[in-house]
Image (cartoon, rainbow, N blue to C red):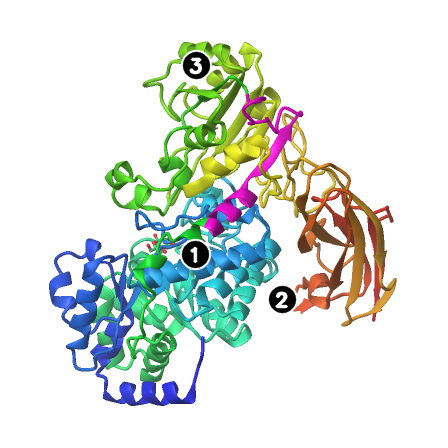
Amino acid sequence: MKITPENERKISELLEKMSVRDKILQMFQMDKSAHKEEFPALSEENLGSYLSIMGEEVEALRQKAKATEHAIPPIFGIDAIHGHAWRPFATIFPSQLAMACSWNEELIEEMGAATAKEVNADGLDWVFSPVLCIARDTRWGRVDETFGEDPYLIGKLGAAIIRGYERDGLVASCAKHYIGYGEATGGRDSYDTEVTMRKVREVFLPPFKEAVEAGASTVMTAYGTLDGTPMTAHRELLTDILRGELGFEGFVVTDYCNYKLISTKHRVAQDAREAARLGITAGNDMSMNTVAFIDAAVAEAECGNIPMETIDEAVRRILRVKFALGLFEEKERMPKSVIACKEHRRLNHALTRESLVLLKNNGVIPIDNSPEKAPKSIAVIGPNANGMENQYGDWTFTSHREPAEYKRMKNDRYTVLAGMREIFPDSEIKYCLGCPVSGEEGADIAEAVRLAESADLTVLVLGDDLSQNGEAKDRAKLELTGKQTELLAAVKAVGKPLVTVMVTGKPLCIGDVLEKSDAVVQMFCGSDLGGLAAAELISGKFNPSGKLPISYPRSVGALPCYYNGYSSWHWGGYCDEERGALLSFGYGLSFTEYEYSDMEVSERTVKNGESFTVSANVTNKGKMAGKETVQLYITDHFSSVMTPRINLRGFKKIHLEPGETKRVCFTVTPDDLALVNRREETVVEPGKFTVYIAPCVPDFTYEEEKMAKIVEITE
Ligand code: BGC
């Protein structure tokens, strides 16, 4: 976001002319659907922002604002979190969790830029994206909205998407939900988060630091409380840390009705007036919804309970973003033709291919689809084989607006069934449901068995549905629901090759699926082209390169199972469950084999505060070209506070032709070695560190190994 002296002067002039009510109205974002009664009168006033309004009404509201005394343009926000997905017929990219599997910052940045164009063309100005929450308790319903479990990866991918959104000044991005939301107790959406401030700094803050550095224009406060203080009222985090330390210059918006929440649920404010005072003085600039906020904030400001300078600062920050977006000049918008244009489709295709993770393959795939060699017939079976809703996941028009639209859609959307039909034109593709995701209605496992028996190969598409994935859809169980496990066992018993595709919003407990299938492809919510890319992967049209941004639990009781936990005397296992994650962060197969060798560090002894480099060769030993994500991990041997066993501190995605070797080099900076000490300071403590270059999380070690070297940091 550009801050210019010229705009600052204009803002000062405006502030001088505005009444207290004018200012508070700028600090309000209206959701029409929640306030139908108040909407007609309020929309005649100069409101700061509208939420989730689309179509012709946007322009009508803009014109109304123009007719008000100060004619300040409203900023229109939308949950475009994986493409402009609330709008049918726009480009819907894989969900954040799915795209995180690509570990591809470039593609994710381009995805942000493409989404910005589509949102801008549609008359809107602000995307409530990215989600920088950390998904460690995967019972939480919003795992699919995150970039996974690792603060480092989340920070890098979050920064990439923000650079894309903000690149051409077409929309403002919104880093959310500040902070610790994903760590809510019991994985219960919007509950309290019981973590210390030291932990906040170590784990939850780094992605927001990256977001601010990448130029995020806005930040959204989380619903929950942190150690008893609602985020909406957390002055230390919102003002001292976010603005004072991180240097954030944009504005902060609350999440939906947070002002109401702090008096009705958190009960730290007695009424709307106290809530308004607490929230504004803590550092919130805009209230998302809660109409009572307007009169309450006006009354508190007029009697001096909220200093006018605080209100002016909040309004200044909001106006800054509006000026930076060119809303006052009515900057020309992108043409509507960018929405779902061919270029975005190409980008979506590339990103979707890299978003798939091959979890298992005993050699059954790739399957030749040439007319001579293609299987005669393929059975495509399963509840997620022939419907787009679950493949789109949450925050799309199918989950939030009009599912009926989906029925009318004729353009480029691929279920796995549609993908298989297109990629295997010479095979007879037979389909049946087998069973629904939940419940038993319509289940016919005998039919599925007959179909599998009559085919040369079965592609089984299992997963979850929209009642199990999304906001406030937390799960106490993570096993496959309905009769899916039975369906899997029955199809396996047929004895023909079995490829399973998982269309899910999160990692489920899939021990059974891995055991019974010959190959398993994890799609998560692959959106528009998920089905096409899955079929292409099965046929070997491209070499899979996705790696997991999140670990898979063996069972719900074994959560959390994220890779960068702590060591303990008893190793954190359970007497009735195998130790460790079923599949760990960083894991993913391909159709070729990469060899890692010749690791070197530039120096063995490094002065504290200085950087060093670490490099290794990576060779494609197989017959197929491919992309490999090379990962850098670090373990701190001894320190004043306990540190995670191992932490990701770098990654590079490289392309390798068969037989090709590339040398991959990382620079390790002091930031990569830092910890947060007991005084909450981020420091590097001298001592030994092991650095690893690996294709996935390595076993941590205090010894030197082929791909692990020890470096000593001196005073
Ligand atoms: C969600 C936010 C979202 C907002 C606006 C809330 O329920 O928590 O992530 O941006 O609604 O739709």
Q: Which residue is mark 1?
A: 225
Write the residue at 30% across / 50% down: 87
Marks 1,3: beta carbons within 8 A: no
Q: Work out which quarter of the rendered image holds the N terminus and state it.
A: bottom left
Q: Quadrant of ligand 1?
A: bottom left
Q: Amino acid at mark 3?
A: Ala
Residue 383 horizontal side relative to residue 23, left or right: right
Helix or strand or loop: what does disc 2 sit on? loop
Specify the quadrant of the image occupied by residue 3. Answer: bottom left
Residue 679: x percent and y percent? 65, 67
Magenta highlight range: 346-374
Residue 405: x percent and y percent? 25, 41
Q: Work out which quarter of the rendered image holds the C terminus and state it.
A: bottom right
Write the residue at 28% across / 56% down: 52
Between tags 2 and 3, which lies in front? 3
Residue 290 horizontal side relative to residue 4, left or right: left
Helix or strand or loop: what does disc 1 sit on? strand
Between tags 1 and 3, which lies in front? 3
Q: Which residue is mark 2?
A: 680
Specify the quadrant of the image occupied by residue 5. Answer: bottom left
Residue 343: x percent and y percent? 44, 54
Residue 95 horizontal side relative to residue 399, left or right: right
177 and 46: which is toward the camera: 46
Cα–Cα span, label 2 and label 1: 20 Å
**Marking on residue 448:** 3
396 and 297: which is toward the camera: 396
Helix or strand or loop: what does disc 3 sit on? helix
Cα–Cα span, label 1 and label 3: 48 Å
221 and 442: which is toward the camera: 442
In this rendering, the answer to whether 408 lies above or below 673 is: above
Q: Earlier in the sequence, mark 2 or mark 1?
A: 1
